[in-house]
Amino acid sequence: MIAIVIAAIVAIAVFALYDRHAGQSESRAGLLERGMSPGHRMLNEEAGRTLPSNAPRIQRADALLTRASARFRTSKDQVAELALQTRNAIAKERPEDVIDVLDAVLFATDGLPAGRVPPLAPILAAYAKIRMDGGSVVAARNVARSFAELAAKDMPPS
């Protein structure tokens, strides 16, 4: 009976040390990532490495995410995730920049009344379709804008 209790205590201690060690490595990564802005995290994922915090694209990415977040009434993290998914899908076919993706959705909805802005995902899909079919960034932006304007007309006033 005493041997079982001692074995149980040893097992608990070993698991506690393992969990503590695993938690520390996750905590360090979490602390590093927690100090990053959504734009910085998004650009890191696009680049596949950690960019220096003074990289000039980070401020632009953060500004675009802030504007898109306000326009589509969703979190910056959600906007970043959808934009990055769109960029990654296009990048399988041709080079694409996540900044271009964000610019496109903002261009597509520029001037639309706040209550008539269509959801983000379909606009991204319209942009991606043209890019994956070989269209230029400008052509894809224009199609996304036409799509957003048409969708806005069909939306009920809020």
Image (spheres, helix red, strand yellow):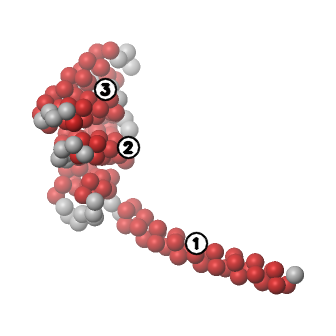
Label located before the other in sequence (3 or 1):
1
Q: Give the residue at x 76% y 81%.
A: 7
Neighbour tally class for label 2: few under 14, some 14-19, many 20 plus, Cα within 10 Å: some
Q: Give the residue at x 14% y 33%.
A: 135
Residue 116, quarter of the rendered image: top left
Find residue 132 and report its horizontal and vertical position in percent: 22, 36
Identify residue type, mark 3: Val
Q: Give the residue at x 81% y 80%.
A: 4
Residue picked out by circle 2: 78
Secondary structure under the numbered disc 1 in the rendered image: helix
**Residue 125 visible to the viewer:** yes
Q: Nearer the viewer, residue 56 or 87?
A: 87
Marker disc for residue 73: none
Label located before the other in sequence (3 or 2):
2
Neighbour tally class for label 3: few under 14, some 14-19, many 20 plus, Cα within 10 Å: many
Find residue 143 and report its horizontal and vertical position in percent: 19, 26
Identify residue type, mark 2: Gln
Q: Are marks 3 and 1 in contact (CB under 8 Å)?
A: no
**Residue 107 visible to the viewer:** no
Q: Give the residue at x 28% y 60%.
A: 48
Q: How many marks?
A: 3
Identify residue type, mark 1: Asp
Between the C-alphas of marks 3 and 1, the distance is 46 Å
Marker disc for residue 117: 3
Residue picked out by circle 1: 19
Label located before the other in sequence (2 or 1):
1
